[in-house]
Amino acid sequence: MRGRPQAAVVTVSSGLAFVPKAANPVYPATKAAIHSWTQGLRHQVRDTPVSVREIAPPLVATELTPGQSQVAAAMPLQKSIGEVQGILSQLIVPDEILVSRVGFQRRAEAEGR
């Protein structure tokens, strides 16, 4: 990848990468590990043409977990995909591709929540 003029590694974490969830602590812990690994990798390749991006979606209405598609708070899948595509299409793509509904989770620690 380093030999190409441009390359990218894209990981998918979750809004739960930024906050714990007492009811199911394993899932957020694995997403936090992906977030941490992504940050470390980004630092390792910072002087190369490789970009490292992290997509952090919110709860999305899919059947990843049975019944999840029926949860009222879940973001419709197409809306989530549309937001990610819109961010990826920008002239300058941020390192963290945060779907709008995860902002409150991303800022939780900084805001003392």
Image (cartoon, grey):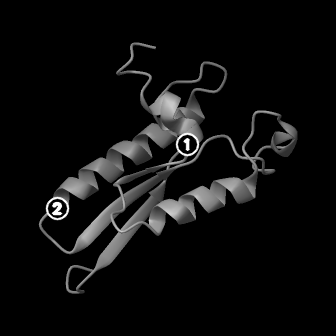
Q: Residues within 10 Å of mark 2 (few under 14, many from 20)?
A: few
Mark 2 touches mark 1? (CB < 8 Å): no
| Residue located at (55% from left, 42% from top) | 100
Residue 3 sits in quarter: bottom left
Residue extending furthest toward the front: 91
| Residue located at (43% from left, 64% from top) | 10
Residue extending furthest toward the left: 47
Relative to residue 79, is residue 30 depicted above or below? above
Q: Residues within 10 Å of mark 1 (few under 14, many from 20)?
A: few
**Residue 109 shown left or right of residue 47 in the figure:** right
Q: Which mark is residue 58?
A: none
Of residues 90 and 96, the one nearer the viewer is: 90
Residue extending furthest toward the bottom: 4
Residue for badge 2: 46
Q: Amino acid at mark 2?
A: Arg
User: SS for tag 1?
Assistant: helix
Mark found first going from the N terminus, 2 or 1 = 2
Residue for badge 1: 100
Q: Position of residue 32 (x, y in %)?
A: 44, 38
